[in-house]
Image (spheres, rainbow, N blue to C red):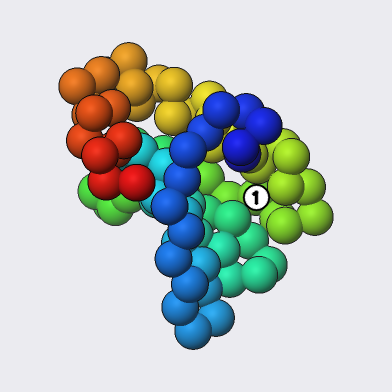
Amino acid sequence: MHDLGVAADIHEGEGIALVSVWVDRVVWTDGRWYRWWTGQTSAKTGRRLYRVYGIDNPVTAARAVAIRRVELQKARPSAEPILMSAS
């Protein structure tokens, strides 16, 4: 993600890694999948909808994360200084 201009904080846990890329945007992996909230909820259940990518193609997953981050930056541009000061 660094090559795509995405700054991130990485946190490891037992069997999982969390990558914070923007306000309200955390990507996590269990070593088999990358997952993150799409920003949408199901009309039927009200539950959050997640994007999921297999770890076999990290470049595609990173591009999808970068695209979603740009969308979030446009929606919440004032969050940038908060993220920069926290890194």
Of all residues, the one furthest to the bottom in this rendering is: 14
Lateral position of residue 72 relative to residue 2, left or right: left
Residue type of the residue flagged with mark 1:
Tyr
Q: Count the marks.
A: 1
Residue drawn where x is 45% and y is 78% of the image: 13
Q: Is residue 18 above or below residue 30?
A: above
Residue at screen point 29% across, 52% down: 47
Query: Which of the pair 75/13 is nearer the observer?
Result: 13
Q: Identify the residue under disc 1.
A: 53
Label 1: element kind: strand
Residue ID at (61%, 37%): 2
> Which residue lies most toward the top here?
74
Q: Nearer the viewer, residue 79 or 35?
A: 79
Sort mark 1 into few (<14), some (14-19) or many (20+) by Cα contacts within 10 Å. Answer: some
> In screen coordinates, is 44 left or right of 82?
right
Which is nearer the eye, 56 or 5? 5
Q: Is residue 56 above or below residue 82?
A: below
- Residue 74 seen: yes
Image location of residue 16, percent across then percent down: 52, 73
Camera-nearest residue between 13 and 54:
13
Q: Position of residue 1 (x, y in %)?
A: 61, 39
Q: Is residue 44 in view from this perspective?
A: no
- When the figure is inspected, residue 78 is found, relative to residue 2, above or below; the finding is above
Q: Position of residue 14 (x, y in %)?
A: 49, 84
Where residue 4 sits, quadrant-wise, is top right
Which residue is at a point 46% across and 45% down the rendered structure image? 8
The image quarter in which residue 60 lies: top right
